[in-house]
Amino acid sequence: MGTPQRTDRLAAGDELAPFTFEVTEEFNENYLHAVEDFHPRYMTGEGDEPPIIHAGLLFNFSNLTRSPSFSLPAGIAAIHTHEEATFFAPAPVGSTLTVSWKITDTFEKRGRLYQVVEALITTADGKQVLRRVSTNIYMG
């Protein structure tokens, strides 16, 4: 297996390796304690609905750096400059989620390279949970 392609050199249409993770009840509760958010929708569920995964956890685990193929050389940093997010549906605690990333655009502005990345979180049965479109600049 060769050296992974540098993420900062990916072009529109390129994809990063997907990342799959399960949000167990314990994992979810640990996150909720860390951010001190104990709203019933996350802890016990509301009405007949099961507890749902915290939106912050979804954002944290859909960051570009979570991809197994994310790679930058020493001295280069990815700096997040813009974000648009669309929530499609809550994901219940206990879900196995997959994040996929696709480069949708690259452009240069003021001599710096920018990259637009779409991240999509889906459940094991393919239901869309969250779509993020992030713009990053690479500097070093």
Image (cartoon, helix red, strand yellow):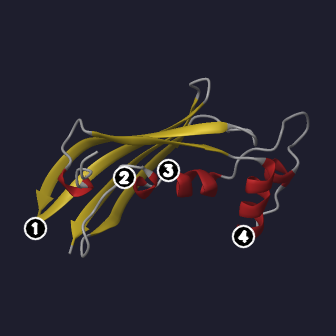
Identify which amino acid the numbered label 4 is placed on: Ala
Q: Quadrant of the C terminus?
A: bottom left
Q: Are marks 2 and 4 in contact (CB under 8 Å)?
A: no
Where does label 4 land, which residue?
34
Q: Mark 4 or mark 2, which is nearer the start of the sequence?
A: 4
The picture places residue 3, in percent across and down from the top left corner, at 24, 53
Q: Which residue is mark 1?
A: 110
Estimate the x, y position of residue 116 in percent, counting from the top left: 28, 49
Q: Along the polypeptide, which appears first: circle 3 or circle 2?
A: 3
Q: Are marks 3 and 1 in contact (CB under 8 Å)?
A: no
- Name the image quarter holding residue 110: bottom left
Mark closer to the observer (2, 4): 4
Badge 3 local density, few (<14 within 10 Å), some, or many (20+)?
many
At 38% across and 41% down in the image, what residue appears?
17
Q: Residues within 10 Å of mark 2 (few under 14, many from 20)?
A: many
Front position in the image: 109 or 14: 14
Q: Amino acid at mark 1?
A: Arg
Label 1 vs 2, first from the N-terminus: 1
Tag of residue 62: 3
Q: From mark 2 to mark 4, how far is it between C-alphas? A: 25 Å
In the image, which disc is placed on residue 134? 2
Q: CA distance from mark 3 to mark 2?
A: 11 Å
Q: Are marks 1 and 2 in contact (CB under 8 Å)?
A: no
Q: Looking at the image, which residue is at 18% across and 44% down?
A: 11
Residue 102 versus residue 138 in the image, above or below: above
- Taking the spot 71% from the left edge, 62% from the top edge, the residue there is 31
4 or 3: tag closer to the N-terminus: 4
Which tag is nearer the camera, tag 3 or tag 2?
3
